[in-house]
Image: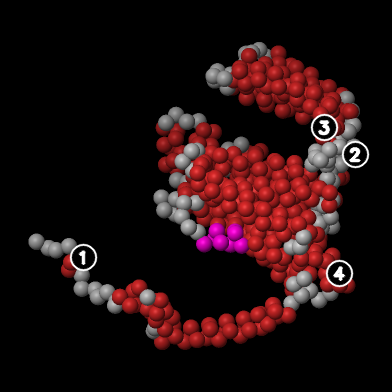
Amino acid sequence: MSQPASQTSTEALPPPTERYTLWGWVYKTLLTPWYNLLLTVVSLWILVALLKGTIGWALRARWEVIPANIRILMVGSYPAEYVWRVWASIWLVAWVVGFSWGVWVRRRERVAWVLLAVPVVLAVVNRGPARWYWLAALALALVGWAVGRWARPRKGGVWATVQWVLYFPVFVLLVRGWGLPEEPAWKFTVAVQLAVVVASLVAGAWAPRVPWVAVGHLAVLAAGLVLGPPWRGALLIAAVVGFMVWQAARRYAHLAGIKRLALQVTLAYLPLLIFVFFAYEPLSRTWLAKVNSNHWGGLLLNILIAVFGIMFSFPLGVAFALGRRSSLPVVRLFSILYIEFVRGVPFITILFMAQVMFPILLPPEMSIDRVVRAIMGVIMFAAAYMAENVRGGLQAIPKGQYEAAHALGLSATQTMLLIILPQALRNVIPVLVGQFIGLLKDTTLVTIVGLLDILGVAQSVLSNPTWIGTQREVYLFVALLFWVLSYGMSYASRRLEQALGVGQR
C-alpha cells in the first residue's frame, strides 16, 4: 500500500536557524544568490545617498511655518467664532471611526498606529487650545473603540452603519449652518410642492384606480406653464415629482403598510409646513447661523467637494451605466453621448464650464454660488468615469445569472437590482475606490477657478514675506495630509474586499 505523500517526500527542510531567525531571513532573501547580494548593496547605497540629504534638509527646514498657519491651511477664512463647528465635526468622526474600528476590525492592524499617530502629530504641530482639541479627538477615538468592542455582539455593525449614515448630513449642517432664502415666495412654492407630492401619495395609496388624479397633475403642469417665475419652475417640478410618486404609490398600493405610510406622511405635513414658515428664522440667528460658502477654504473645502462628489457621482454613474445598456434607444443614446463627451474633455474644462455656463443656463432670478458650481462640475466629470467602471462590472456577469433570475420569475428590474448589480459593484470595488481617491486629489484643481482650497491657501501663505522660501515645508505637509486621507480610503477598500471575499469566492 502506498504511503501518503507527506511521508514519501524527500524534500529537505532548511535548518531551523534559517527558518525562524532574522538572520536566516536576511541570508536567504537579501544575500543569496549573488545577484541578490549585488542588488542589496546597490539599494543600500542609493538609500543612504537619498536619506543623507533628506535628513540634513529636514533638520534645517523652517517647520515653524506649519504651526503658524495651521488654522488657515485647514479651514481657510472660516469665521473664528464658528470654528468650533469644525472641531465638533472632527470629534464626531473620531468617535465614529473608533467605534467602527472596535466593531469591524477583529485583529491587530498596523494601520491603527498610523491613525493614532495622526492626531498626535497634529497636536505637536499646533499651538494653544488646538493642541488639546486634537488630543480630545484621540481620546474620543479610543473611547469609541472601547464602546465598539463592547457593542460588537450587540448589533454593533448596525449601530456603526447608522452612525456613518447620519454623520454626513450632520457634518454638512455643522459646517454650513442653518439659513434659507428669506423671500416669502420661496416658502409658498415649497409649501405647494409638498402639498402636491403628499396628495399624490395619498391618492395612489388609497385610491389607486381613480384616473382623475392624472388630470390634477395636468392642471398643475398647465398652471406652471401659464404662470411666470418663480411659480413656473416650482409647479413644473411639483407636477412631475407628484406624478412619479402617484405612479409608485399605485404600483405598490397592495403592499402592507403603504396606506399607513401615506397617513404618517400626511400627519407630518403640517408640522413640516410650520417649520418651513416659522422655525428657520430663529435658528439662523443662533449658534447655527449660516456660513456662506465664500468663507469655506483650506482642507475643509477639499473634503466637502470630495464628499459631495462621491455621494452624488456614484448613483449618477450607476444610472448612466444602466442607461448605456438599456434597450430603449433614447436612453441608450443619451447615456452614450454624455459619457463620451465628458470623458473626451479635460477636467479643467468641465470646471470652467460649470463656473461660466451654469449661470447663463439658469433663470435670471436663480443664482448658484461658486462652490456649488464646482461641486456640480466634479459630479458631472466623475459620473462619466464611474459609469464606464460600473459598465465593466456589468459585462463581467455571465448570462447564466440573468437566465437563472428569469427562471425564478424575477422581472428585469428585480434581476438587475437584486442579482446583477450587487455582483457587478462587488467586482469593481478596487476600481471605484481608486477613482474616489483620484477624485479627492482632483479637488485641488478648483484653485484654478478662484476657490481657496488647501493649495490656494498654501500659495497665499507662501506669498507672505515672512515665509518666503518655505515651499518644500508647506507642500510636503499638504502631500502628507492627502496621503493620510488616500491611504485611509485604500485601507477601507481592502477591508471591504476581504469582508466580501473579492477574488476569493
Rounded to the nearest angstrom, the CA distance separating label 3 from label 2 is 26 Å
Between disc 1 and disc 3, whose residue precedes?
A: 1
Q: Which residues are magenta?
A: 110-117
Between disc 4 and disc 3, whose residue precedes?
A: 3
- x 86%, y 72%: residue: 466
The residue type indicated by label 2 comes to Pro
Disc number lying in front (3 or 2): 3
Indicate the position of residue 281 as horizontal and vertical percent values. 85, 32
Indicate the position of residue 113 as horizontal and vertical percent values. 56, 61
Q: Is residue 452 left or right of residue 503?
A: right
Q: Dot 1: what SS? A: helix
- x 84%, y 52%: residue: 80
Q: Dot 2: what SS? A: loop
Between disc 1 and disc 4, whose residue precedes?
A: 1
Indicate the position of residue 233 as horizontal and vertical percent values. 82, 31
Question: What residue sits right under mark 1 in the picture?
Answer: 6
Rounded to the nearest angstrom, the CA distance separating label 4 from label 2 is 38 Å
Question: What residue sits right under mark 4 in the picture?
Answer: 463
Q: Nearer the viewer, residue 302 or 131?
A: 131
Disc number lying in front (1 or 3): 3
Between disc 3 and disc 2, whose residue precedes?
A: 3
Disc number lying in front (4 or 3): 3
The residue type indicated by label 3 comes to Tyr
Q: How many tags in the picture? A: 4
Between disc 1 and disc 2, whose residue precedes?
A: 1
Q: Nearer the viewer, residue 443 or 348?
A: 443
Question: What residue sits right under mark 3 in the picture?
Answer: 280
Residue 364, label in figure: 2
Q: Nearer the viewer, residue 484 or 6?
A: 484
Quadrant of residue 213 within the rendered picture: top right
